[in-house]
Image: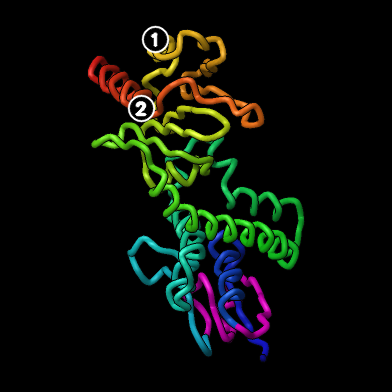
C-alpha cells in the first residue's frame, strides 16, 4: 500500500464527496489538498477532482467538460464501479451541484448537505476537520442506503393493495416511509403493522385533506372512532394498537384501502 496525492477545487459538496468516495475506492492512503484553481493550474497530483486544471498522473474526475447532468462524485462512482449506495450518494451530490435546490424554499435549502458544509467552513473549521465530520455523515448515509436496498424486495412481497394509477399503496410491515415514497411514489401510503394502521399523503400533494375522510372511517369503525387520530394539517391519519395486548386493527386493510381510493378519486374529480 502506497500513498497518493489527491487535489480538489476549493471545497464544496461535490469536491468533498468526491474525495470521500475516492478514499473508499482506492486501497492506498490518500493525502488531500483543496487548492485554488490558480494553484491547481501549476500543480501535479495522482488524482484531480472537480477541477479541469493541473497535471494528473493517474486520473482526473471532473464534470466541467460535459453538458451531461452529472458531477465529479458520480465520475468517481462510475470509474471504480462502486455500488448502488455510493451511486445514490453521488446522485444527491449531483442534484445539489446542478442547482436542484432551486426547486426548494429557504427551509429546504437550510437542510441541504451543502449548507451544512458551508456552515462548518464559515465557523472556521479546517479542511481536515470537515473531511472527518463529513466522513461520519457520509458513512451513515451509505449504511442507510444499503439497508434501504435490502428492504425493497420485502416491501414488494408485503404489498397488500396497489391501485392501477398508484393513488393508494398499502403495505404490511413497519417499513421506512421515505424508502416507500422514494421508490414506489404512491400518492397515499397505507401502512399496516402490529402497531396499527396509518395513512400518509405524499409530501408534494396539498389535497385532498384526510380530515374529510373521517366520515368514511366512522362508517367502517363507529365503535372506535375516538381512537383514530386525524392530523389537523390533513396529511396523516392513524389508529394505534398495543401489540402486548394483542389488539387487532378494527378495519379490514383491503376494504379500507379501496374506500380510501374511492375517496381520493372523488376528491380529485371535484377539484
Q: Secondary structure at mark 1?
A: helix
Estimate how packed mark 2 is, as few (under 14), some (14 to 19) or many (20 or more) residues with alpha carbons within 10 Å: many
Q: Residue furthest front?
A: 246
Q: CA distance from mark 1 to mark 2?
A: 14 Å
Point 31% across, 37% down: residue: 162
Percent position (x, y) of residue 217? Answer: 42, 14
The spot of residue 161 in percent (x, y) is: 34, 36
Where 139 falls versus 193 (above or below)?
below
Residue that mark 1 sits on: 219
Residue placed under numbered mark 2 in the picture: 257
The residue lying at 38 percent from left, 72 percent from top is 65
> Between 131 and 174, which is closer to the camera in this rendering?
174
Q: Quadrant of residue 111?
A: top right
Frontmost residue, 145 versus 1: 145
Magenta stretch encompasses residue 99 = no
Q: Quadrant of the N terminus?
A: bottom right
Residue at screen point 69% across, 65% down? 131
Q: How many numbered tags mark residues here? A: 2
x, y percent for residue 142: 57, 61
Q: Local crowd at mark 1 within 10 Å, few (<14), some, or many (≥20)? A: few
Corner quadrant of residue 19: bottom right
Q: Nearer the viewer, residue 50 or 164?
A: 164
Is residue 246 rendered to the left or right of residue 233?
right
Q: Which residues are magenta?
A: 27-55
Colouring rule applied to residues: rainbow
Sooner in the amino-acid sequence: mark 1 or mark 2? 1
Amino acid at each position: 500500500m502506497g500513498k497518493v496525492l489527491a487535489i480538489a477545487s476549493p471545497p464544496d459538496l461535490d469536491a468533498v464527496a468526491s474525495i470521500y468516495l475516492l478514499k473508499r475506492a482506492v486501497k492506498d492512503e490518500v493525502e488531500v489538498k483543496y487548492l485554488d484553481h490558480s494553484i491547481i493550474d501549476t500543480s501535479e497530483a495522482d488524482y484531480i477532482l472537480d477541477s479541469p486544471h493541473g497535471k494528473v498522473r493517474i486520473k482526473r474526475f471532473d464534470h466541467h467538460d460535459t453538458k451531461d447532468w452529472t458531477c465529479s462524485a458520480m465520475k468517481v462512482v462510475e470509474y471504480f464501479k462502486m455500488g448502488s449506495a455510493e451511486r445514490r450518494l453521488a446522485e444527491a451530490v449531483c442534484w445539489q451541484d446542478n442547482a436542484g435546490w432551486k426547486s426548494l424554499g429557504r427551509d429546504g435549502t437550510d437542510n441541504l448537505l451543502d449548507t451544512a458544509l458551508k456552515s462548518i467552513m464559515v465557523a472556521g473549521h479546517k479542511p481536515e476537520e470537515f473531511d472527518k465530520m463529513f466522513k461520519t455523515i457520509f458513512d451513515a448515509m451509505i449504511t442507510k442506503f444499503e439497508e434501504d436496498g435490502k428492504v425493497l424486495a420485502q416491501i414488494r412481497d408485503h404489498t397488500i393493495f396497489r391501485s392501477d394509477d398508484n393513488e393508494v399503496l398499502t403495505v404490511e410491515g413497519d417499513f421506512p416511509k421515505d424508502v416507500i415514497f422514494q421508490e414506489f411514489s404512491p400518492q397515499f401510503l397505507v401502512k399496516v403493522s402490529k402497531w396499527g394502521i396509518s395513512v400518509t399523503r405524499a409530501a408534494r400533494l396539498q389535497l385532498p385533506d384526510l380530515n374529510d375522510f373521517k366520515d368514511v372511517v366512522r362508517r367502517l369503525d363507529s365503535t372506535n372512532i375516538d381512537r383514530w387520530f386525524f392530523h389537523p394539517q390533513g396529511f396523516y391519519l392513524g389508529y394505534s394498537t398495543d401489540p402486548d395486548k394483542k389488539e387487532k386493527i378494527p378495519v379490514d386493510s383491503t376494504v379500507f384501502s379501496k374506500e380510501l381510493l374511492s375517496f381520493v378519486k372523488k376528491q380529485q374529480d371535484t377539484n
